[in-house]
Image (cartoon, rainbow, N blue to C red):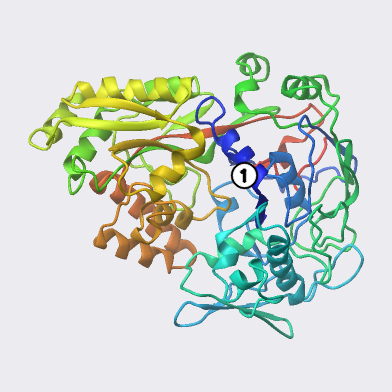
Amino acid sequence: MVYLRASNVRRVVSLLMVAGGVALLAVAAYGRDARTSVREGGTFRIAQYQPITNLDPALVDPDSVALQLLDATCAHLMTYPDRQPPRGYRLIPEVATGYPRVSRDGRTYTFVLSRSYRFNTKAPVRPSAFAWAITRALRLAALDRQGLTPAPLLLDIVGAEEVADGRAQNVTGITVRGNRLVIRLLRRVPDFAARMTEVCAVPPGLPPDLEGRLTFAAAGPYYIAKHVRGRTIVLQRNRQYHGPRPHHVERIVVDEDAASYDDVLQRVRRGLADYGWAPPAYFRDGLVKRYGVNRSQFWVKPGFDLIHYVFNSRSPLFRNNPALRRAVSFAVNRAAVRHALVGGALRARLTDKYLPPAFPGFDNARIYPLKRPNLKRARALAKGHRRSGRAVLYTLDRPVPIAAAQVIARNLARIGLDVTVKPIDGVSYFPRLATNRDEPWDLAFAAWAPSYFDPHAYLNELFDGRFIGVTNLGRFDVRKYNRMLRHAAGGRGKSRYQAYGALDVRLARDAAPSVAIQFNNVLTLVSRRVDKRCIVLRPYFDLAAVCLKP
């Protein structure tokens, strides 16, 4: 997905606030057992409550099931394998024959494409399919400037902004040369290859329709054979697909007539549907007793959405004061904060670091206490570093995040900090943190859920000085860490993940730019018909991988 309607952006934010801080999507994965064959064919049925308006790659609804359906139909230059973690989160080529060749200045990427991919219409997938996907999305922005928000990955391309503004028709930074796609960038973007997992091949010439195309040719394992808005969506297996991704069931059918999220889960329990997405709050504790956890039908795995409390690194209290930031990290009762936010261990995994625990290279070193605070250590670190002894904590003006903030205020009172909790309305909350340098806050609630699996999307975007005013809410800007973050971003393969894993520990332990609290879990319920060997969630249920029991 490369574009969002403004109304849908608000839906993303609202989902992030479920239960006061539960983010959109979470990740888990279970791979197939290669020793025995799985069933081919059959129909996989999905119950859906909220109607899916669009599956057009340039306008797709930011709804979990919509994104899952799109993933099953898309062919990307780069992708992630349909495997359990950490393997399932290692970036690999898909339509590209290998990693892109990058110029010395880091601003030109050359992708060489395989000649074996085809759309379900038998038309070959050429570089123009990706060039047009990007151009088409930008032209849609030009047609509806108030309703569409371009993703940063597109605006980093030379000439992209001119197309999005309606000043040009073609992106000057994209060139097609035979089976090569050459993309020139305005600046160095170390995670650009990972960002290209968000661009879906479309037939060249597919019109940029603001209403979204209901059906169109696709080059992934499946294609959209039928879409009646608000009623039914049918995905059919793409007979022209011969790539490595799994595609076991013959068709995937979405019935959009569920009366509620409770109805969605009830249909799955009764076997009337094989799967249906619902927010974590709708999963009752009785499911654990009935199905167990991670056995066959009910799955709970740590996800990719981080809940943390960011220090304002430029406030008089915390500027150049890592000792006090670390003291706060020792003093916060993470378990109590989690209980206030989401209710317990079923819905979130506690953490003291910033990278998701399933990431390649993740270092599980224990830095801060997870179940109860270490007040002795916290007081020792705070001694001589309390300065004014007063702090302002910003949070959302909703009962659940306010309750969590009050837990932190009580925790910090025990180490000599007087904390004032200040609720802020949800519309202005994040813009005020990101863009207003004069906001008088010291600590603030934050939720982060990037759309692709790359450590750059966490550590760099949250703590690199280059992202101040955008995603680096705390304005953390330390030359030493900037240098290490950018060096890690420039790596490739296993060594890159290892460098980020080590840097994650070092940031949390020594600099403490924020207090990491939890990664929200993904909760998934499937019917008895689903073969558990084919259950892959990365970060959402992988519909291409699913298979039914023999």
Residue type at mark 1 is: Val
Give the quarter of the image for residue 529. top right
User: Does residue 9 appear left or right of residue 471 in this picture?
Assistant: right
Q: Nearer the viewer, residue 202 or 284?
A: 202
Pick out the residue farthest to the bottom: 177
**Picture coordinates of residue 499, whole percent (x, y):** 38, 59
- Which residue is under mark 1? 9
How many callouts does the rendering have? 1
Residue 192 lies in quadrant: bottom right
Q: Is residue 292 visible?
A: no
Residue at point 27%, 34% (across, down): 329
Q: Secondary structure at mark 1?
A: helix
| Residue ranking furthest to the left | 384
Mark 1 crowdedness (10 Å alpha carbons): few <14, some 14-19, many ≥20: some
Measured as percent of width and height from the top left, residue 125 is found at 80, 72
- The N terminus - image quarter: bottom right
Q: Position of residue 425 (x, y in %)?
A: 47, 32
Can you say which quadrant of the picture contains the C terminus? top right
Q: Please say if 239 is above or below 167.
A: above
Left/right placement of residue 13 relative to residue 337 reads right
Q: Is residue 423 above or below residue 38?
A: above
Where 446 sits versus 377, above or below?
A: below
| Residue at horizontal 89 percent and vertical 38 percent from the top | 232
- Residue closest to the eye, 412 or 358: 412
Which residue sits at x=81%, y=43%?
38
Near-viewer residue (534 or 47): 47
